[in-house]
Image: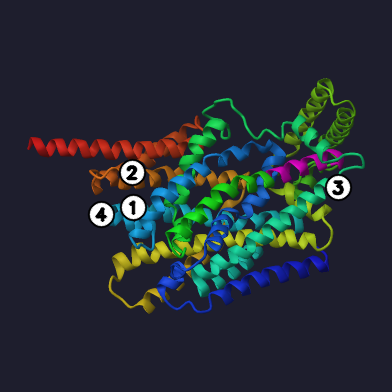
Amino acid sequence: MRLLDWIVLAATIGFIVLYGLWKSRKTSTVSGYLLADRSLPWYTVALSIMATQASAVTFISTTGQAYADGMRFIQFYFGLPIAMIIVSAFFAPRFRNANVFTAYEYLEKRFDAKTRALVSLIFLIQRGFAVGMILYAPAVVLTVILGWNDQGTTLMMGSIVILYTMLGGIRAVAWTDFQQMVIMLVGLFAALLVAVLGLPDGVGFGDALLVAASAGKLNAVTTNFDWYDRYNLFSGLLGGTFLALAYFGCDQSQVQRYLTGKDLQQSRVSLLFNAVAKIPMQFFILLTGAMVFVFYVFTAPPVTFHSGNLKKVEGTAVAARHDAAVVERQQAAYELLKTRDSAHQAAFLEAQKKLDVVHKEATASGNDTNYVFMTFVTQHLPAGFVGLVIAVIFGAAMSASSGEINSLATVTMVDFYQRFVKKDSSDQHYLWFSRAATVFWGVYAVASAQLARGLGSLVEAVNMLGSLFYGGLLGVFLLAFFFPRVGGTAAFLGVLAGEAAIFYTHSTGKVGFLWYNVIGCVVVVLAGVILSVLWRAEKRQS
């Protein structure tokens, strides 16, 4: 990092945090702290929702995912527009009309206290695991690429997040998210531009697309049906819809965002904006990864993007075979661009497969997917832009983790402390406890971040973790909304049955994780309905 990069990094992060604190300077009530007094405009809510999803994992790992596996990860989001329409039509109005702080308050109004407590606990467990992973994502990469200490990096980011989230609450989180999202898109566009402009003379953007397509990197839609395949059209449309429904309809980190809107209309517009904008944004991120792949076709990539492991293989036979395979692939790419025929396309693909075999051998000691993008950024972007992209990574990690910490604190205060510990206290007392809970979850996030070591592709790890729990969450809310004759005990047992089914399916290793959301949800609904029918029949007989 050069001096200009440090200046850009410090100025960007400083501006984001100070702006958020300034916008939240009048927060003095629990309603203001947790829901911004339900006063935010739709565009702030919309970008806050998007920024909470677009963690550092998105920028670091999704680009690496496209580099390694192509763009088929985009299918993960195919169900999102469908889910957003359903959430805006059914979920948002119920939560707003019930005048709740958390989604799980609604479950007590509809069922009973034990169902609310169970689902709140599931949320705390799931988000508690995820928040450390989200915070650790940039730390692990910056440790390897820049030599920064990972514990120091997570501590620094965690401290900043705790500061502005504890002081400003959801209003500070939302307005910092707004700024961070804008800067994220600028930084990402800069990286894509450098990748394309860095191609050799005579190789244009259309040529880059041809090379990427020939290597199978533009495989945005795959129609083959395979239960174990994580990303295909069917798993994306069905499993992705269920996952997005659970995330935006049942996860407090998202529900809390659209509860801050000025009214129901503003909340709905923010959700529908994400329905329209999310897939193009993810496509843009994945395309950047594909263009980075093409850049390294014409500029020799390292044997492994993990600099620590690179030292182990330099000068070995594996490194020599890698260098030879890189040259062979580059020559095949030039021949492909010269002839543009199927024979040379097949030759290029064969050269790519040979390089993949050598690369797999070189990275046997550790997956390097998460290091691809930052290696490209630090080695090939001009001064100033490196600092900007690192600020994007920091900002993404901070926006996502601040949203998670805020929602964890909200559930802790509303669904447990206020409900079971101290029911009738002053607004100032609950505000004080909310701030204390924010600090607790912030410290927890920093402490648990180290557990994310060795998880491979972090974007997959985060979504797999969510899929272990989201099916159960979605199922119980569907029971609450659409099955009025199902009671609290049946719903409670249905959630337990759904989670048992998910973890059993996961243990078999025979089904891709997107299907967990479908399986869990269906089991919860069936169990709840069947138990209710049986109990009603038993009562009639007695």
Q: Which residues are magenta?
A: 286-300
Q: Mark 2 or mark 3: which comes first in sequence?
A: 3
Q: Mark 4 or mark 3: which comes first in sequence?
A: 4
Color theme of the render: rainbow
| Amino acid type, residue under disc 1 in the picture | Leu
Tell whether label 1 touches label 4 (CB within 8 Å): no
**Secondary structure of the residue carrying numbered label 4:** loop
Vertical relation: 500 (above or below) 351: below
Location of residue 398 by image quarter: bottom right
| Amino acid type, residue under disc 2 in the picture | Leu
| Amino acid type, residue under disc 4 in the picture | Asp
Q: Nearer the viewer, mark 1 or mark 3?
A: 3
Q: CA distance from mark 1 to mark 3?
A: 53 Å
Q: CA distance from mark 4 to mark 3?
A: 60 Å
Q: Mark 2 or mark 4: which comes first in sequence?
A: 4
Q: What residue is pinned by disc 3?
A: 198
Q: Which mark is residue 193?
A: none
Q: What residue is pinned by disc 2?
A: 496
Most extreme residue toward the top is 343
Q: What residue is pinned by disc 1?
A: 118
Q: Nearer the viewer, mark 2 or mark 3?
A: 3
Q: What residue is pinned by disc 4?
A: 112
Q: CA distance from mark 2 to mark 3?
A: 54 Å
Tell whether label 3 touches label 2 (CB within 8 Å): no
Tell whether label 1 touches label 2 (CB within 8 Å): yes
Q: Mark 1 or mark 3: which comes first in sequence?
A: 1
Q: CA distance from mark 2 to mark 1?
A: 9 Å
Can you give x and y, in whole percent of width and height, for residue 476 in the image? 34, 46
Taking the image as shown, residue 363 lies to the left or right of residue 36, namely right
